[in-house]
Image (cartoon, rainbow, N blue to C red):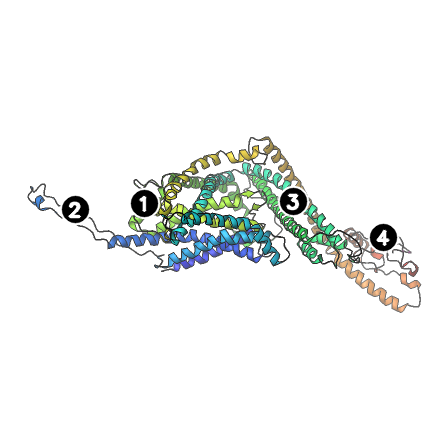
Amino acid sequence: MSGAALGIEIVVVFFLALFLLHRYGDFRKQQRMVLFGTLLAWYLCFLIVFILPLDVSTTIYKQCKIDHEKPVSVPTASPSAANNTTANASVTPTKSAPKPCYKPWSYIPDGIMPVFWRVVYWTSQCLTWLLLPFMQSYARSGGFSITGKIKTALIENAIYYGTYLLIFGSLLIYVAVHPEWHLSWYELQTIGITAANTWGLFLLVLLLGYGLVEIPRSYWNASRHGHLLIKTYFKASKLMTEKADAEENLEDVMEEVRKVSESIKYNHPLRKYIDTILRKCPVDYQEKMGRNMDDYEDFDDKQNTYPSEKSLVKLHKQVIYAVQRHNRTRVQWQILLQQAVHLEDVAKNETSSSHQFVHSFPSSEPASWFSRYVYTPTVEWYWECLLKRWFYRLLSVVLTLFSVAVVWSECTFFSTRPVLSLFAVFIQLAERDYNYLYIEMACFITIFFLCTCVYSTVFRIRVFNYYYLASHHQTDAYSLQFSGMLFCRLTPPLCLNFLGLIHMDSAISHQQKEQTAYTSIMGSMRVLSFIANGFYIYYPMLIVILCIATYFSLGTRCLNLLGFQQFVGDSEMTSDLIDEGKELIRREKRKRQRIEDGENRRREWKERYGNPREDYTTRNRSSHEMKETSYSDTVTSSNNRQAKYSRSGSRAERDCIELLQDAEPLDFNADSLTDDPLDAESGRHAGGRYLSMSSSRSRIFDDV
């Protein structure tokens, strides 16, 4: 099993990152470079989290081997003690031999982990500080060529990269003018790593303080169906406002595109850029602009003021943003509507005595075998109305205990004698018996909970419309890459903080123990002792204040006072938005009910009378063939052109067909009218577009 666990986790983590990217990104529409950069960033961060427990167990095994290689001193009785009385002549007991070291099942051979961590760490840092910012600007650029996009990305990142170069150059000059400082390349590298980890730790504590409180509270609120339904109404009202704003913005942008498209004709040099912009527009707008387009005029015939290429680049960028926002709000509205309907169904079924879950709008798709045999309506009722709330409450209590343990350990992990950090106590108890499986599971659960608190906050946070991770393939390229940047900056300090919680980081615990391979690539923090002995120890204590502020929703209340609509229970604005959202959901349900009723009526007519439209088309075709035959036989007589042919079938059947068929336009220019539409001339257009089909040659151009 040597190295096999490492290979298995590498493959599993890749598919996990691919699954999350598929949920939030769009493989068919987004650029391959954007998807690859985001996938690589997420994959490397998840890889660090999953591989670190193996590094911890391997380090504990190496420490065990070092302890066994040390000579064991066996104290003997002194000569003076032999002259004492027999009662006092006791020999000091010898120290018991340490337990033998067992190689863990997931042991990784020497030399692999340092190289592995070095490649993973520096690749992630190059992504977050160099490549992803450039790719962000490239993806958001409205340029029409690769060269134009690269030029725009370089200009936008000039200030970004210039700031880094200025700081780095200032540090080099500061070191050069102080001859007492003899910093080697290794020490400069350590300073850079420390600076990056310090920035990441500053942001990490803020996100962790929010997640430690909000995640347990979200599961507790999920067990309260009434509260969850009211919050869904509130979200519906906000989302409808955003949806209307997105539609209005799209209309304005499309109007500007229409004006530009009408001013620049087909033979203009900039017309190819207009065609590129039109391909990014929705299909209905493309058809509308195509119908209004008149390409028969030459652009040189009129002295118009044409837009520049720079303005077209800006318009292209606006079109991409407007279409993405419109599609996102439309999909989110449908998802939120389904959630609201489901929660209302749960509220109705809670008082049901039949213990059968009934949906307001049953699915039109055939039920799967899982729904027929496992997740039956009875099982669904017990889960949705009874068991689910208690499961969420139990899970909320367990997560609350984890959060309390994390807060306590963050405030006391610097104390090694006595050991106050709860996670360090658990690891040291397992280390005595060399229970490597327990060590790896404890490390994995702890770091997984920390990552869940931090990463879930990254997925929930929203910076207006510039950064927003939306599921169901609705996240734009900018937000995907920004999340990759945050992950790469937060994961290394998160892992260092975890190693400090379990006393595996000697820079914080000040213990002479074997270092993990991950800590070794970070360098010695003694170069910047004020950070290792000050900031890394005392700054995490701020998490207590952040948890208290999150528990009392101070940030939400402040945003509500500033005018941002937030869900605050005792606010009048919140009550108005809840009532508005309830009315919106009721309106959408009525609309969906009318659609279903219409489909049911059409289905009943089809079941009762078959498919009259196909039958009517077949009869028209046969009548047309009969008419052509009759016309060829009576070509010498002009009066036979208006002959009527009898149809098979009773009058009742024909009445039913009349009721179901589409209304056909009447020809008021025809020489004769028929009362029965089935007895009319079969030569009319099937689609009903041509309103006049005169049987007289003299009236052939009347419609024109």
Could you tell me how far apart the alpha carbons at marks 4 and 1 are, in whole angstroms? Answer: 95 Å
Could you tell me how far apart the alpha carbons at marks 1 and 2 are, in whole angstroms? Answer: 31 Å
Tell me where residue 364 appears, x and y as whole percent. Answer: 63, 51
Tell me where residue 505 appears, x and y as whole percent. Answer: 35, 47
* Residue 531: quadrant of the picture: top left
Q: Residue 246 carries which label?
A: 3
Q: Which residue position is annotated with label 1?
A: 510
Q: Residue 93 carries which label?
A: 2
Tell me where residue 25 appears, x and y as whole percent. Answer: 56, 52
| Cβ atoms at labels 2 and 3 below 8 Å apart | no
Q: Which of marks 3 and 4 is nearer the N terminus?
A: 3
Q: Is residue 108 visible?
A: yes
Q: Which of marks 2 and 3 is nearer the N terminus?
A: 2
How dense is the environment of label 1, judged by Cα within 10 Å: few (below 14), some, or many (20 and up)?
few
Q: Which residue position is annotated with label 4?
A: 666
| Cβ atoms at labels 1 and 3 below 8 Å apart | no
Location of the C terminus (image quadrant)? bottom right
Tell me where residue 674 appears, x and y as whole percent. Answer: 87, 54
Name the secondary structure under disc 1.
loop
Kind of residue at badge 3: Ala
Q: Which of marks 4 and 1 is nearer the N terminus?
A: 1
Could you tell me how far apart the alpha carbons at marks 2 and 3 are, in whole angstroms? Answer: 81 Å
